[in-house]
Amino acid sequence: MSVREVLTFPNPVNDYAARTTAGLVVVLAIIAVAVNEPIVYGLLALGFALRVASGPTLSPFGQLSVKFIVPKIVREEKLVPGPPKRFAQAIGLVVSGVAFVLSLFGFGLAAQLATGILIAAATLESVFGFCLGCTTFGFLQREGIIPESVCEACNNISLRNPAAV
């Protein structure tokens, strides 16, 4: 597998795998808030960085979701466009990165509050299937801030995979 293949975000994405990964993020984020140590915030940010770079390919949570939890436990597939999911992961990277830096500089309460935002967003995704980052992506695309070419399937239902509708 080439570097280019490894550093490619999948499109489409199995929504159940994304939701499962979000559930694992919730668990780690709660641990980060409870422990309030830079290393845990760093692990949280690293996970988001790996998922932004390659979807589940390099991410331990992504691999656990895609290769074990979804095929062996959930056993369902619902394909959704990848670009909004990558955008959501990028927002998670920014927020978890901020929490990591705050924690490094001794601002533990601020790091906990930032991580609370992640917990809320990841819980919405995991439990209710509502992706806050994806919704933001759609809004930004409708406003012309994100070009339609980034995700034509997001705006044109006829281009979507039939399993995604």
Image (cartoon, grey):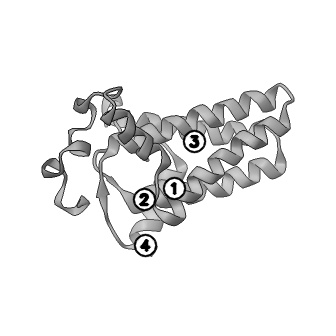
User: What is the distance, in whole Å, between disc 2 and disc 3 at their CAs?
Assistant: 15 Å
Q: Nearer the viewer, residue 130 or 106?
A: 130
Which element carries disc 4, helix, strand or loop? helix
Q: Which mark, by number, is residue 47?
A: 3
Q: Which residue is mark 4?
A: 74
User: What is the distance, in whole Å, between disc 4 and disc 2 at their CAs?
Assistant: 9 Å
Q: Amino acid at mark 3?
A: Gly
Residue drawn at x 71%, y 39% as measured from the top left: 114
Among all residues in the image, which is located at the extreme right?
106
Which element carries disc 1, helix, strand or loop? helix
Q: Is residue 55 visible?
A: no
Residue drawn at x 14%, y 48% as measured from the top left: 159
Q: Nearer the viewer, residue 120 or 43?
A: 120
Q: Which mark, by number, is residue 17?
A: 2
Earlier sequence position, callout 2 versus callout 3: 2
Q: Amino acid at mark 1?
A: Thr
Which element carries disc 3, helix, strand or loop? helix
Q: Are marks 2 and 1 in contact (CB under 8 Å)?
A: yes
Quadrant containing the C terminus in the rendered view: bottom left
Q: Are marks 1 and 3 in contact (CB under 8 Å)?
A: no
Earlier sequence position, callout 3 versus callout 4: 3
Earlier sequence position, callout 1 versus callout 4: 1
150 shown above or below 18: above
Earlier sequence position, callout 1 versus callout 3: 1
User: What is the distance, in whole Å, between disc 1 and disc 4 at their CAs?
Assistant: 12 Å
Q: Amino acid at mark 4?
A: Val
Q: Which residue is mark 1?
A: 21
